[in-house]
Amino acid sequence: MKRIVHALGISLLSLGPLTGCFDRVDLEDASLSLVAGVDITEDHRTMSYTSIPVFSKAEKKSQELKVVANTQREGRGKLDAFTVGTFNGRKIKVIALSKRFVQETPDWFRYMDIYFRDGRNPITPRVVVFDGTLDQLFYYHSPNQPILPLMLMGMIKSASERSETVDTTLQELHRQMNEEGQTPFLTEMSIKQDAMIDGTSLLDHKGRYVDMLSMPETVLLRILQKNARQSVGFSLRMPSSLTGSTANEDWVSIATERVKVKIDSAYAGGRFRFFVNLRFSASVVEKLSGLDLDDHQGGAEAACAEELRDKFEALIAKLQRKKVDPVGFGIYARAHHYKRFKQVKENWGEAFGQSEVKVRVSVGFADEGSVK
Amino acid sequence: MGILSLFGGKHKRKSQRPSGNPGSQALPDEPFATDLRSNLDKLSELFPDTLDLTVRRLHIRATGQDAALVYIDGLTDKIDINTSIIRPLLMQTGISGEIPIEIGRMIRIYGWNDLTVAVLKGSSVLLVEGSDEAIVMRTGGWPQRNPTDPKMETSLRGAQQGFVETIEQNIAMIRRYLPNRELKFKNFNVGRRGNTQVSIAYLEDVANPDILRELEDRIGRLDIDLIINTGELAELIEDNPYSPFPQLMITERPDAAVSQIAQGRFVVLVDRSPTVLIGPSSFVTFFQNIDDYSTRWSIATFIRMLRFLAFFISISLPAFYIAVTSFNFELVPIKLLITIGTYRGTVPFAPFIEAAFMELTLEMIREAGVRLPSPIGQTVGIVGGIVIGQAIVQAGLISNIMVVVVAFTAISSFILPNLDMVAAVRIIRFSFMVAASLFGIFGLLVGLMILVGHMISLETLGTPFSTPFAPMRFSDWRDTVVRSPLWKLTRRPVGAHPIQTRRQGDNRPKGDG
């Protein structure tokens, strides 16, 4: 018996001084911030937003608050004054940044420091750029939608699973911000008729907002990033010489089965050169014209490849024009031509804008559908 | 010495026994007198005021001697005494001058101590004029019940016969399964007053003699007034009485006991108790059930896995609930978190109070149901069902989620086949709940680590309790979480430390081909 008492005593004593023993907050007593937002006022002061689920029989299921604060931490202190329970940021799932904040605040990423420095904060929330003031987003209550955090999470998840937007967590953003050979990219959304995903925001190395990609462009970006998760679909226009029908009926829709992406790099003539080789294995899911795929498979495949190449070339030209590299060509350059890369690593986006990118696409039909 | 070793040290028995004498029967063994009259005087001196002691004086026709038959009325079979003893003694004419008795089992004794014991245990004793010996005849006929189907350990396919309160019958039931010369019974008398017969049953060419010696030693050293039940014996001889875990399995099923004997384990039978002890019992044996071997192996495996899963659920689920609702809510997926929060929002108690209240209510209902006679017992069920299921939630005292947790925990603990293990699980569950309410997930993990450490160091009859997991005995894994097909179990489990390991040859069904 004495042994047991000793053993229990020693265990309890050794547990006593540990951290984690004093922070008991029951779930219903905590004000769990699920969405955090950062915006700026007219006079460029930062504002903190939050959305907190309300655990009561109240009609309204969540509480939205905003305060003007110099830092995120100060914002929390001020927000705590409004909440019933203890303000708690451990379960933040989405961080919404207003487009103005990203555009007009130099080096805005330092406001995210609290998530990395304070180990209790999660580093997995999705980061979203909202096109508009955050008032619009946080005080928007669609009768058709669940509460704000669930709505945002659901929209990001479904759109990114279809590769129509990116799925950038705070941790991933941290990597992108510190990556010399790539520029950051975030989900972009707005409220038009209802809350909707617009596509992908492109940021430069400093995190300044540069431009955005539409959802179809994002699909191409995700393919180039080798990050297109599920099958993606394209509707492509065949040349009428092949289909022999009117312009409205020239469309063929394909769904990718497997995509092989190969990016080679070279350095010549004072600039980087990239060779992007894309091999699509796709199935035909829709065809409007009378094109006989058995007879003209080779021709149809080549026509699809050409259409796709045009799309990729347009995307890359846009990226080069804006001097951003969300694909990460710089990573290839660094891996294969480190000495050259080292000279331009301070501003890879500039160097990427001047480099030459060649795209080659080949398409093979794996399946032509169930009917002839 | 690590902290954990503090928990698991082998329980050291004190070698010095108190010298006091709890019984009062240890008279110096006095021989009988040859004179019947003085013997009878002595008898009435030994048994004063014993109304149920019968002394029948008679004249043995065969030898012409006077004699007295001594027995206790209620403990003996009167028909047996009349037809097999008294009638031959009175009627039969002698052939060779021997006393004619038609009873199979009779022995001669020479002292009063033996007589006292024999008479009190239901034998009849014949004292004969001119002889300094007495004849003891087994005429036991005390109130007995017939073997009925086991009440606590019901089985779908197993035998419908449970042990009864008479050790002879229990031994007979074991022998019926194992008509084998190597099946041995080692007998002890335990209790100075109770004088209870305790028998160790084992297969001599299979069971490990070292464990037998340990078991004999522990039983032999007992110095006690009386043991009523097998459970008392278990508590007196187990390795670590402070452990929550039972270290010796108690069963009321002869088939279960025999299957353990066949694996090389020992079964301890206690007279007057309808249950037997099985040792050494490792952790996994408490999860095995006789039905596992009579159902198809794939189903049995699935049920085994369910049991292990249920064990972990029922020790840790309420603690986990407390931990995630009081400390670590970031672990819960957000939709579930919002659901839990919605229900918790209206409850006035902290999760620990809530959980402890519900678990205690459940334990009370369970305990009430066990002790009450069955007509009232049903009422308890109804009251409990309404209290737990509905009223308490509608009153807003307890959240719905908590009811789900408690119900899930209860169901999980019900599928464990061994009652002692279920009791252990309850104790562990409550301590985990306390740990979780103080330290959250961290407390739960520390609790689990202490539990695992304790299990590893625990012993049963001097052999490891947590075999075949610690120490690893991969060959035994065939009959743990997975119940392999019977033809694969060609060797007896190493955990039982048998000296003869081969159990069967190649019995794999070959089918038609």
Image (spheres, coloured by chain):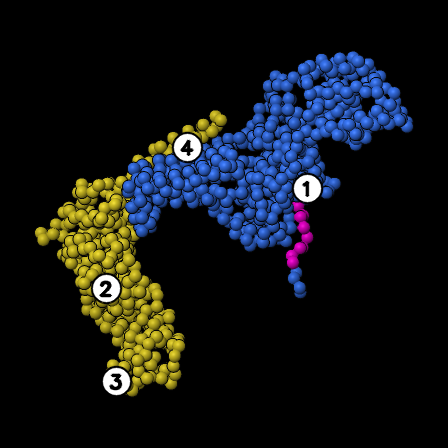
Chain colours: A yellow, B blue
Q: Which residue is mark 4?
A: A11
- Disc 3 from disc 1: Cα separation: 90 Å
Chain containing the residue with disc 3: A
Q: How far is mark 1 from mark 4, CA to CA?
A: 43 Å
> What whole-number distance in Å separates the C-alpha atoms at marks 3 and 2?
32 Å
Q: Is residue B440 left or right of residue A96?
A: right
Q: Counting residues from the N terminus, which is met first, the one under dot 4 or under dot 2?
A: 4
Q: Look at the numbered disc 2 and give the secondary structure of its residue.
A: strand
Give the quarter of the figure containing the C terminus of chain A. Answer: bottom left
At 19% from the left and 53% from the top, the residue drawn is: A138
CB atoms of marks 4 and 3 within 8 Å: no
Q: Inspect the image, locate mark 2, and give the three-letter code of the amino acid beneath it.
A: Gly
Q: Chain of mark 2?
A: A
Which residue is located at x 37 percent, y 70 percent?
A258
Mark 4 or mark 3, earlier in chain: 4
Q: What span is in magenta?
A: B501-509
What residue lies at 27% left-to-right and 40% top-to-bottom?
A29
Mark 3 vs mark 2: tell me if same chain. yes
The secondary structure making up most of the magenta span is loop
Give the residue displayed 82% in from the left and 15% down from the top.
B34
Q: Answer left or right for B280 relative to A223.
A: right
Q: Residue furthest right?
A: B95
Residue B461 visible in the picture: yes
Three-letter amino acid code at disc 1? Answer: Val
Give the class, few, some or many, for how many residues have Cα within 10 Å of label 2's Cα (few <14, many ≥20): many
Identity of the residue furthest to the left in this view:
A43
Mark 4, mark 3: which one is toward the viewer? 3
Amino acid type assigned to the residue bearing label 4 in the image: Ser
Q: Which residue is mark 3?
A: A246
